[in-house]
Structures are given as structure tokens and as C-alpha cells.
């Protein structure tokens, strides 16, 4: 499976497990809500520093979001 | 530690463990040698699709390179 799709599915699953809306999560990650939406759909190819920003509020490692 | 530095150290350690020069590895990964050099020095902020290209010839997951 494409790594962008895997990333998106992991982000969505972890976000939803925490009961956060995309907007809640975007605020915590310091990323725009539309960017979160694109990430979850596998429509972005973020850099590693963005992956780290995505991972931080979820309490997981950056690497965990890619596998 | 900055995620770009971690990535670079992981790439270098795994490449050297395989006895490959940067040029050997660059050819296997389909990436330019100077880009490999920059990655190993933490001077690049690659996208997740590039991380996957970096991981493939090393036989590790993309996530393993970030942690």
C-alpha cells in the first residue's frame, strides 16, 4: 500500500480513537484542518518534520505513523 | 534530537553496516549521491515517499528510519 495512504489511515485511526475532530487535532498538531483532511485521504506527501508534528499530539513516534 | 538528524544517522549506520559506499547505496535507492550525503548529514527534510525509497534497499521499514 502507498505510504501516503498508510500514513493517512494511521492518523485517522489514532485521531478517532482519541475522540478528536479534525479541527481538534489540527489545533493540537499546529497544522491547518484542511491539511489534516488531505493527509487522512492520502493526498499529501509530507516531509519528515511534518510527520513529527502529526505524531506528537497522538503520543506515538513519527515512525509509527508510517508503518 | 531533530528527526532529520535521526534519519541521517539511521541511514548512515545501516548503509555502512552493509559495506556500501554512498554511491552504491544511491544507485540502489534510485537517489542522487549528493542527496544521500545531505540526508546523512541531516541537511534535508525529505517527504515520506523519499523515506520509503531510502528504506527499501536497506530492507527496513520507512518508519524504522525515523525512530
Image (cartoon, coloured by chain):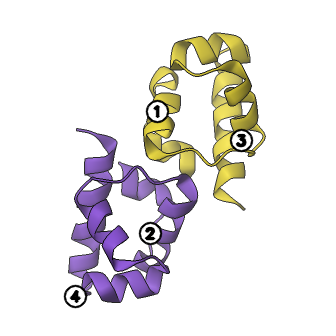
Chain colours: A purple, B yellow
**Residue position marked by numbered label 3 in the rendering:** B9
Query: Quadrant of the rendered structure where residue A8 is?
Result: bottom left
Q: Which circle, 1 or 2, is nearer the viewer?
A: 2
Q: Is residue B26 left or right of residue B61?
A: right
Q: Which circle, 3 or 2, is nearer the viewer?
A: 2
Q: Which circle, 1 or 4, is nearer the viewer?
A: 4
Say if mark 4 contacts mark 3, CB within 8 Å. no
Work out which quarter of the rendered image holds the N terminus of chain A and state it. top left
Residue A19: numbered disc: 4
| Residue at screen point 71% across, 41% down | B9
Q: Position of residue A57 (x, y in %)?
A: 45, 80
B19 is higher (above) or lower (below) than B11: above
Measured in 3D between alpha carbons, the distance from the residue under mark 1 to the one under mark 3, in whole angstroms, is: 14 Å
Task: Mark 1 vs mark 4: tell me if same chain.
Answer: no
Q: Is residue A64 visible?
A: yes
Measured in 3D between alpha carbons, the distance from the residue under mark 1 to the one under mark 2, in whole angstroms, is: 22 Å
- Report crowding for label 3: few under 14, some 14 to 19, many 20 or more residues within 10 A (C-alpha): some
Say if mark 3 contacts mark 2, CB within 8 Å. no
| Residue at screen point 27% across, 69% down | A37
**Residue position marked by numbered label 1 in the rendering:** B60
Instruction: Write down the chain letter for disc 1.
Output: B
Task: Mark 1 vs mark 2: tell me if same chain.
Answer: no
Instruction: Write down the chain letter for disc 4.
Output: A
Task: Mark 3 vs mark 2: tell me if same chain.
Answer: no
Task: Mark 4 vs mark 3: tell me if same chain.
Answer: no
Q: Is residue B20 visible?
A: no
Measured in 3D between alpha carbons, the distance from the residue under mark 3 to the one under mark 2, in whole angstroms, is: 22 Å
**Residue position marked by numbered label 2 in the rendering:** A54
Amino acid at each position: 500500500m502507498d505510504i501516503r495512504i498508510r500514513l493517512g489511515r494511521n492518523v485517522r485511526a489514532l485521531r478517532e480513537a482519541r475522540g478528536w475532530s479534525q479541527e481538534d487535532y489540527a489545533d493540537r498538531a499546529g497544522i491547518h484542518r484542511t491539511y489534516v483532511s488531505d493527509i487522512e485521504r492520502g493526498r499529501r506527501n509530507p516531509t519528515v518534520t511534518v510527520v513529527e508534528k502529526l505524531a506528537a499530539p497522538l503520543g506515538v513516534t513519527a515512525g509509527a505513523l508510517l508503518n
